Amino acid sequence: MRLRNIPRARDVIAESPWVIHDPEAHKGAWQDVFQNKHPLHLEIGTGKGRFILELAQRHPEINYIGIEKFSSVLLRGVERQNELELPNLRFIRGEAEIITEYFAPGEIDRIYLNFSDPWPKKRTAKRRLCSHEFLARYDQILSAQGSVEFKTDNRELFDFGVEEIEISNFRISAITYDLHADPVLNEGNIMTEYEERFSAKGNKICKYILIRKI
């Protein structure tokens, strides 16, 4: 899918006090950014920010960071945060591949992956956020009791992700192949824009929660 370039996006993001422009400088010290010791949750590929904005409003006792690589996509989330000024939310315009440069070992308590790019070609499989290469990165920055939550309507991508778990330090804590019909995992579910669109078409939403192997 070709992204529409929005010329003002970079300026808005550059001027926003809610965007961290030097995340490497805060590695191991994100508590100082939020000025508290609340748990820190991370969404990788935050898109337009709908999911993480809603989470931050519902849970002021948790700090949230959303990472998105494309300025024109992140723009809407940043503009909304400029209005809301939620003290427990920050954004990073950056690359998921280098999250270990942004966060210290054990610094993150939960990671969210929502409707990630499937990177369908076999040669790009390692770029999928549910690949074992990325699971290894998550393993470095998650706390001992940390977890990974992954949602997608792409069954092929989801099956790939499930297979990748076998060669990682994680295990499945919960899984469903029809989230909206699952009374347990769907409780408190926040739908992303993609989730709303795809489920309206009749697509079933898959989800798993990972924790570390004992």
Image (cartoon, helix red, strand yellow):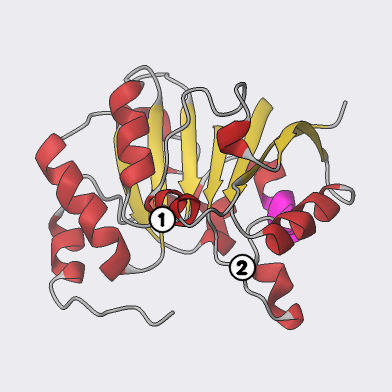
Q: Which residue lies furthest to the front in this view?
A: 202
| Residue at horizontal 41 percent and vertical 49 percent from the top | 196
Report the residue at 19% width, 68% height from top: 9
Q: Nearer the viewer, residue 207 or 66?
A: 207
Q: Which residue is drawn at 48% across and 33% down?
A: 41
- Residue 84 position (above or below residue 193): above
Name the foreground residue: 128 vs 97: 128
- Amino acid at pointer 2: Pro
**Which kind of residue does numbered mark 1 sit on?**
Arg
Q: Position of residue 177 (x, y in %)?
A: 70, 43
Question: Which of the pair 55/204 is nearer the observer?
Answer: 204
Residue 22 on image: x %, y %: 35, 55
The answer to whether residue 119 is visible is yes
Q: In this view, does 187 lie to the left or right of 179?
A: left
Which secondary structure is most common in the magenta stretch?
A: helix
Q: Residue 118 carries which label?
A: 2
Residue picked out by circle 1: 197
* Quarter of the figure with the C terminus: top right
Query: Could you say which quadrant of the image residue 33 lies in?
Result: top left
The residue lying at 35 percent from left, 19 percent from top is 36
Quadrant assignment for the N terminus: bottom left
| Residue 109 x %, y % | 57, 29
Magenta stretch bounds: 131-137
